């Protein structure tokens, strides 16, 4: 099975622009989560989607949004980019067949976003 | 809010040494503890999902234990190899469809 894929891998934007990141989960997986990693910080939870429904959202401003499509692919959008949004954005997929907390999450390679 | 602490922050060992590091958390509402290995420029790789007090997992030279009553998990690597060099992350799974990560232990194994 192919792993989790994320596009693009690298992105440079300027302040005020918006950006859309894409995540394709492992085939058959229905849960997709997004995390942000900034220098010196652990992975911070952004959102989780299951069957096109957002089940949880982390403590991020409304400029961060996401969605999931019927084929389980997910996108996240950041509007009005700020310098502090420069980070590695990781997505993870899970089968979504049991308790989320006890299910292995499979991570993609991430999208590295640089905001100038 | 669950807070996950990992120690040490970084660790340098010689090839062949055995090593261990700690993940600490409040012994309260969570349902699983996850360990990940994250090599530079790669995706975090799942090592273990642990769910019960006293749970022990093993994968080759790597093993982990979980003590939910006292709020810690240990990850052990026996006979470290240079390819074990990575950041090791632990994360708690609570009831809210997210994982709460610690900041990781960075392991460097010198040949």
Image: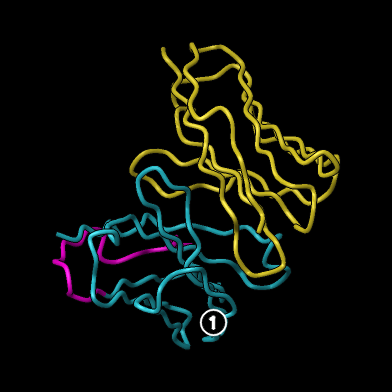
Circle 1 crowding by C-alpha within 10 Å: few under 14, some 14–19, many from 20: some
Left or right: A107 in relation to B22: left
Q: Nearer the viewer, residue B80 or B68?
A: B68
Part of the protein shown in magenta: A1-19
Chain ID, cyan in image:
A
Left or right: A67 in relation to B72: left
Image quarter in which the C terminus of chain A is found:
bottom left
What SS does tag 1 mark? strand
Chain B appears in which tint?
Answer: yellow
Name the residue at 48% across, 58% down: A44
Above or below B28: residue B97: below
In the image, is residue A8 part of the stretch drawn in magenta? yes
In the image, is residue B67 part of the stretch drawn in magenta? no
Above or below B82: residue A94: below
Above or below A71: residue A115: above
**Residue B45 position within the rendered picture, expressed as x and y whole percent measured from the top left:** 51, 47
**Residue B47 position within the rendered picture, expressed as x and y whole percent measured from the top left:** 60, 43
Q: Quadrant of residue A54?
A: bottom right
Name the residue at 53% across, 78% down: A49
Left or right: A62 in relation to B23: left
The residue carrying mark 1 is: A54
**Residue A17 position within the rendered picture, expressed as x and y whole percent measured from the top left:** 17, 75
Query: Which chain's residue wears label 1?
Result: A
Q: Nearer the viewer, residue A2 or A52?
A: A52
Name the residue at 45% across, 19% down: B109
Name the residue at 31% across, 55% down: A87
Tell me which colouring the rendered structure shows. Answer: by chain
């Amino acid at each position: 099975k192919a792993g989790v894929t994320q596009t693009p891998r690298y992105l440079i934007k300027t302040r005020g622009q918006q950006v859309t990141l894409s995540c394709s989960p492992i085939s058959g997986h229905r849960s997709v989560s997004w995390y942000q990693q900034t220098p010196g910080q652990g992975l911070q939870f952004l959102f989780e989607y299951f069957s096109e429904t957002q089940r949880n959202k982390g403590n991020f401003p409304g400029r961060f949004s996401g969605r999931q499509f019927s084929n389980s692919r997910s996108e996240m959008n950041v509007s009005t980019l700020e310098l502090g949004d420069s980070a590695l954005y990781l997505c993870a997929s899970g089968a979504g067949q049991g308790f989320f907390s006890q299910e292995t999450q499979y991570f993609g390679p991430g999208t590295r976003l640089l905001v100038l | 809010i669950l807070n996950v602490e990992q120690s040490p922050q970084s660790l340098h060992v010689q090839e062949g040494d055995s090593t261990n590091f700690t993940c600490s958390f409040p012994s309260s509402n969570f349902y699983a503890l996850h360990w990940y290995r994250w090599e530079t420029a790669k995706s975090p790789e799942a090592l273990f999902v642990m769910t019960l007090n006293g749970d022990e997992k093993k994968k080759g030279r790597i093993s982990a234990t979980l003590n939910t009553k006292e709020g810690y998990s240990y990850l052990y690597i026996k006979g470290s190899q240079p390819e074990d060099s990575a950041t090791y992350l632990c994360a708690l799974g609570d009831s809210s469809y997210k994982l709460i990560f610690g900041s990781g232990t960075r392991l460097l194994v010198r040949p």
